[in-house]
Image: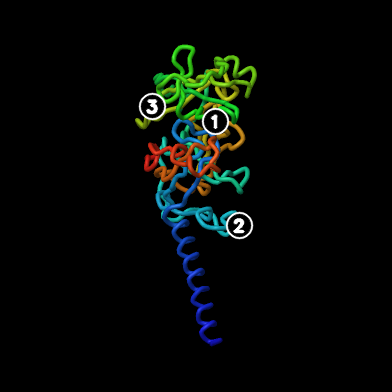
Amino acid sequence: MPLKNTNAAREWFNTIFYGGLIAIIFRSLLLEPFNIPSGSMIPTLHVGDHIFVQKWAYGYSRYSFPFGSWKMWNGRFWGHEPAVGDVIVFRNPIDESQDYIKRLIGMPGDRIKMTGGRLYINGNEVPREKKGDYIVANLPKSLRSVGFYQDNMSIKGNKIWIDNAPAPFNYTIEYKDDRYCKMYAGACGVFKLTEYTETLPNGVQHSIIEASDDAPLDNTDEFVVPEKHYFFMGDNRDNSLDSRADVGYVPRDNVLGPAWFIWYSHNYYSPMVAVWNWNSKMRWDRFGMGVK
């Protein structure tokens, strides 16, 4: 009898050990899941998106593996250069406990500058074309509980519409323009940003949003990207901590891999406690969406 108990315990231990080992190898070498905790990559990625990152795409560094912050070695093996426009997860060089996701804008040797909200790469203005208005909602919980979410809202004239129908509740939402919102940060109920399609020098097109062309990060000195470093920016240009400010240049070793696709997404601002409402809180249209 004791022998059987010992064998059962050993089998249980082996199952847990090898299962954990396979999971670590899978996450380190193939695919690693990440969730999006902030709006710095809106409109490409939303808060509440969960993505898979390709770990093999650019090769491996010590940050590809658990305990990568320990200085075990430097450099990459089986390395491949990323391309401008790739959406990439990297280890924050200022705080190695944090992983960031941004868009690659500058390669080693590139000159990057922002002037009047316009991006310049190597002295050439990056063209952008207005796509439309992007709605941002800063709403109280009382409104979220009855179906007012940023994801299903739009502004037509001076009215708020929900899922392409007039808002069915007798509730006044103060609508501000971007100038007011910039002066009194966080005071807005619902306001509009401008969405643009930007075309990078290699032809990659992607969407960005901006509140204005004179925000603090819309005018910068010229950055010259050092050797073995990259320059990253968020698609939410006026609300992103990136290479223009605190993050700075990102060493090649800190790159983890490109975002591949969204495998799960839910409305982060909608409470998940009510299990019976989960279906309405899922962003079904974002499941399986590629990141580009």
Task: Name the quadrant containing residue 161.
Answer: top left
Q: Quadrant of the C terminus?
A: top left
**Which element carries disc 3, helix, strand or loop?**
strand
Q: Which mark is residue 36?
A: none
Task: Name the quadrant containing residue 124.
Answer: top left
- Say which residue label 1 marks: 144
Q: Amino acid at mark 2?
A: Trp
- Say which residue label 2 marks: 70
Closer to viewer: mark 2 or mark 1: 1
Percent position of residue 5, x then y: 54, 82
Comparing 219 with 261, the one in front is 261
Comparing 237 with 244, the one in front is 237
Percent position of residue 75, x then y: 51, 53
* Mark 3 or 2, nearer chain start: 2
Q: Residues within 10 Å of mark 3 (few under 14, many from 20)?
A: some
Q: Is residue 112 visible?
A: no
Rendered residue at 50%/64% (across/down): 20
The extreme left residue here reads 203
Q: Amino acid at mark 3?
A: Thr
Q: Is residue 221 above or below residue 25?
A: above
